[in-house]
Each structure stands twice: as structure tokens, then as C-alpha cells.
Amino acid sequence: MTDAPRFPLTAILAQDDLVTALLLCAVDPALGGVLVRGERGTAKTTAVRALAALLPEQDVALGCPYGVAPGEPCPCGERHDGVARRSAPMVELPLGATLERVVGALDVRRALAAGEAVFEPGLLAAAHRGVLYADEVNLLPDAAVDVLLDVAASGVNVVERDGQSVRHAARFLLVGTMNPEEGELRPQLLDRFGLGIEVHAPGEPAQRTEVVRRRLRFDADPAAFVAEHAGEEAALARRLTAARDALPGVALPDRQLVRITTLCARLNVDGLRADLACTRAALALAALDGADEVQDHHVERAAALALTHRLRRDPLAPPPSPQTVSDALADQDADEGPQPPSDGPSGGGPSGGGDAGDADASRPALTYRGSDDLDRRFGGEPAPAEPEAGVPAPPIRLDARRRAATAGRRARAQGTGVVVDARAGDDDIAILPTLVAARGAAVQPHHLRSARREGRQGALVVLCVDASGSMGARKRMALVKGTALALLGDAYQRRDRVALVTFRGTGAQLPLAPTGAIDHAAAALRALPTGGRTPIAAGLRLAADVVRRERLREPGRAAVVVLVSDGRSNAGEDPAQAAALLARQDVHLLVVDGEQGHVRLGGARRIAAAAAPKSTILPLDPRAQGSDLATRVRAIAA
């Protein structure tokens, strides 16, 4: 059975950064892979599959399930006498993959049929010496992501579970794709990717027309389209192979290394992994260009690919642009003054007029020999959001002693994550409980036990913000926005899904549907208009509808509605009835009372009382640091 034709990499248009990043990781897998962020329908998956088809064929030990090369130690313990030839593997990591499927587990058939404890390799073993593709990597279960982090960094998969102890090589080119609208990636995993790029659909009508035309031709006759680009694909494959062979001999002038490390320090990136990734990318670019040493333009291109995704410190701010890196490097070069051109190893010959005291003349160029990845990440906390004009934004401050315990998703989630228990059943069979139930006898249907899994997931936080005229008076709305931004910062750390509901005039609006992209919520909140009457009930009913629709997809997700209002409803029905509806839906209502002044009507307290005991009330205190609000939400959603 032959594989279906894949869209050629050389036929992909208007995605130069994507193609370049994939080629660089193929030249030097030690880069740590590439993270591709972008909207739907921008050829992310198509490019990854096309790259796998370009990789050279491999010799493997005949019949080895781990795909080891001839002469490489095989953990299966069996003797492999022959050598087979295969294409470079490409393994796609599905979102619903269990931890056992990823790392490997006991062979279910042999364990149940013969009572033999035999290890069955997982997806990490299948990806050895190939490509591991994690689509929607930001949505993967925490347990699978943690393992992926360790194995991608070390190149070795260590399994200690179910009485098994297995250690095998798992070196692969890691490619992750994600849609930013579904939420940001965990900072630990983000830093592991050597390169990061943002892709968009082409804006030029002529380019879009040609992209559609090529796709239609491929769908109509894949074989003919692939044959049409076979020459270009073969030339690119030869270039890729030549670059991999030439990489150990590419020289790194000391001046270029200093440019890279100075730039990383200037941009204040965390740790040293960025310096290493940028250096490796520059070397791989030089090898791909057939150059003998790294030159200025190699560093400039590598810096944009390796540093941009590491610059984001404020989770509520828009993603950084590659132009930020380019501008910083240009300013750095301008501060240091003009540099002699780097035209090759000879430096322009002895008559080039170079300064005898120049760093390139006094220090030898480095030659790339490869090195192990860093074992540690020197991280930092996200910077607080920018305050509103005239009002300081209340930052979230976590106690350093509790930070490790409180980070991550808030609430327990059934059906995903690690195995915590077993029950009678024949779906997702738990091997050891099943064998224990059989007590050494042949396994019968009534002995079967299903795994009960438990993981962690974020909560659904619906910000229901009063944008009426009364809240807009006396800069009160600026205080509301600052408090809500502080809550969004905490939601980012907890991997919550956030929705924004506003009400003013005659009804309520949903400026932002539930999303993990906290920066989108912050942008919608900052642009919030104010004025008009106060239909609080309409806002609460829309929030209840948002929770109801979200729970159709994820019934077990904890939900909190945060109402920020002075409680002075003067349009629509009584808000107490809408608050009681939330309580009946098992939704906790957190009321932030924005009523100020000497005369207080107590409307916010009546709303909270209507949802009791599923309610909490807090004052909108301009002197508070925002920590009370975030702490209450954490306690409610835990």
C-alpha cells in the first residue's frame, strides 16, 4: 500500500518563513523544533507533511518497533539480523491521545491473553528519527505535554509504570501548530521550541488566486501535480542533504556570536536557550545557503525566527512582531558603529584594510560541533498589564512560597489525564487492575476493568461588565477595567477560558465569546464604550446563556460569572431573577460592588442575595491590589 501523494513543499506560496523554519529544523534537529502560530487555513499542516516527504530514507534494524539504526542499541532485547529501508516517519499526535499511547504501555493483547508483561512502544518511539507533529499543541492534555517537554529536550523516553522500566531513544523533529484564538501555550513548552513563527493568509489578491489555483489542480490530479514539481522537490532534497552534511564545517565568527548574545541581552530574553537557538539557526541558514561561515544576513534572519516568540512578557499584550527583533538588532549595530563586511573565510584578502585589533582578526572563528540542550529554564513572571489612564491597574501578586502549588489549571476534570482508579467496564482497559481481578486465572469478560482518569482543566470565567453611564462617571470605568485586567492576568496563569459580556442602553452584548486568548479579552475590555441605561438582568441572562452553551461541549467545566456593577438597574426586568437563574445552573456569581458615595441603594447586595448560597460579594476598592478578587475566583473554581 503506497502513501497518498502529498502537496509539494516547493509549491507552497506566500509562506516563506514557515518553509524556512521547517528546513532549518530539518538541517539541525538540535534546534528543538518549530512552533507555528496562525489562523485557520494557512497551510500549516500541509507544509509539515510536505517536509516529511523531503527527508532522506533511513536504514533501520529489521523488525525493530523502535526504528533504531543498524548498530544502535535496541531496547526490545531481540536480535535483528537484517536491515530495512524506510521513509522518514511522520507521527501526528492526536489531541485525545492518552499518556500511555504517547509514551508506551503494556501490550494489552498479550497481557490479557497470555498473562505476559510486554512493553508496547508508543508514539514517541514511532517518531524516532522522524517528525513528531502536534497539531493544536496548546490544547494537549497537561500530562502528555509534560512528557513531550522532557523527551524533546533529552532525546530519550524513560517509562517507569505498570511494573515496567524501559528507556529508549526518541529523537525527532518537533513541529507544533496552534490557533492563537484557542489560547496561548504554556511558557515552559513555548521556550522549548527553538523557532517560532506567525503565519497569515496572503493579502494580495493575485497571490490568493494562485494559491487557490494550485490547490484545485492538486485535488483534481494529485499525481500529475506532484510530477510537475518533482524536479524542484528533488533539487530541494539534495540541498537539504548537502546542508546537513556541511553543517559541522560551518564557521561561526566571534563577531557574529557576540552580536547574537548582545542582542539577546538587549531584548532581555529569559535564560540562554534563546542564544543557543539563534546561533544554531544562523549556522543552519549558512549551511542551507552553501556558505562557509555565518554572515550578517544569516544572524538577522535567524534572530527573527528564534527570538520573536520569546519576547512576550505581558500575557494581556498583543503578540510581539519580528520587526521588534529586527529594529533592536539594527539599533545595536548602529550603536557599535560600522563593521567590516563578512564576505567569507578570507575576509576579503590581506589587502582588505581591516583593523589589526578587530575581534575577527584576534579571535578564531568557532566551528559548530553541536551541544546538549540546557537542562534549566531561567524564567520570570509576566509583566503586569498597562494601567488605564490616571488609574493604577491592580496587579496580581502571588506568594513565592505558594507559586509552584497554585500554577496551572484550576479544577479537576474527569475522563482525562492520568489513571487514578479503575471500575468495571471494557473501555480504556486498565491492565493491572484487570489482571488482579482475574487472580492468575484466564481473563474473562467480568474481570475487565476500565481506567478512571483525572486531570486538571481551567474554569470558564464570564466577565459581566456594567458599561452604563453611571459606571462611566468619575473615572469609575477606568477602575473597573483595571480590576478586570488584573483578573485576566490570573486567568492566564490558570489557563481559564474567558468570555466578556457587557450591558448598556437597552440590552447586553458579547464582545468576546469564550476563548483562551486572554490578550483578545484585554483588547476588547480596553475598547469598551460606556453610556446609557443599566439593563443588569440582560447582562446576567446573556452570561447564563454563554455558560449553558459552553457546558454543552464540556459539561464538567467549573463556571464563574463576575458581575462588575453598581447594582442600580433602571432598564429591563428585575436582576434578582436572572441571578437566581445562575444559581440554578450551578454557576457561582461573584459580584464586585461598584457603588460609591454617601448614598448607597444596595442593589448589588440584593443581586448577590438572590443567588445565595452560590454568590460572593466584594467591594470595588480603588486601594486594593486586585489580589482579593483573584483569590476569590481561585477558591470558587477549585
Image (cartoon, rainbow, N blue to C red):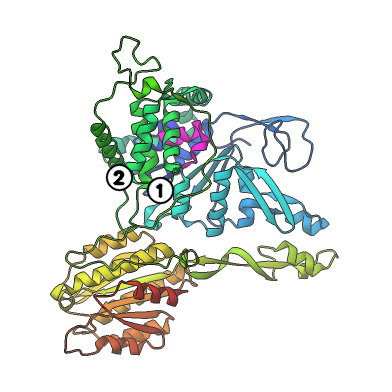
In the displayed orientation, state which residue is furthest to the right.
Answer: 441
Q: Nearer the viewer, residue 16 or 247?
A: 247
Instruction: Give the residue number, with chain letter if any, for mark 2.
Output: 321
Give the magenta-colored segment's residue range: 20-34
Quadrant in the picture for residue 130:
top right
| Residue 557, percent from left and from top | 47, 71
Q: Amino acid at mark 2?
A: Ser
The residue located at (30%, 77%) in the rendering is 563
Q: Is residue 120 above or below residue 498?
A: above
The tag on residue 487 is none
Q: Amino acid at mark 1?
A: Asp
| Residue 146, percent from left and from top | 54, 55
Q: Is residue 116 above or below residue 442?
A: above
| Residue 221, percent from left and from top | 47, 33
Is 104 a magenta residue?
A: no
Q: Secondary structure at mark 1?
A: loop
Q: Is residue 186 above or below residue 1?
A: below
The residue located at (35%, 42%) in the rendering is 265
What secondary structure is the magenta-colored segment mainly? helix
298 relative to 620 in the view: left or right? right
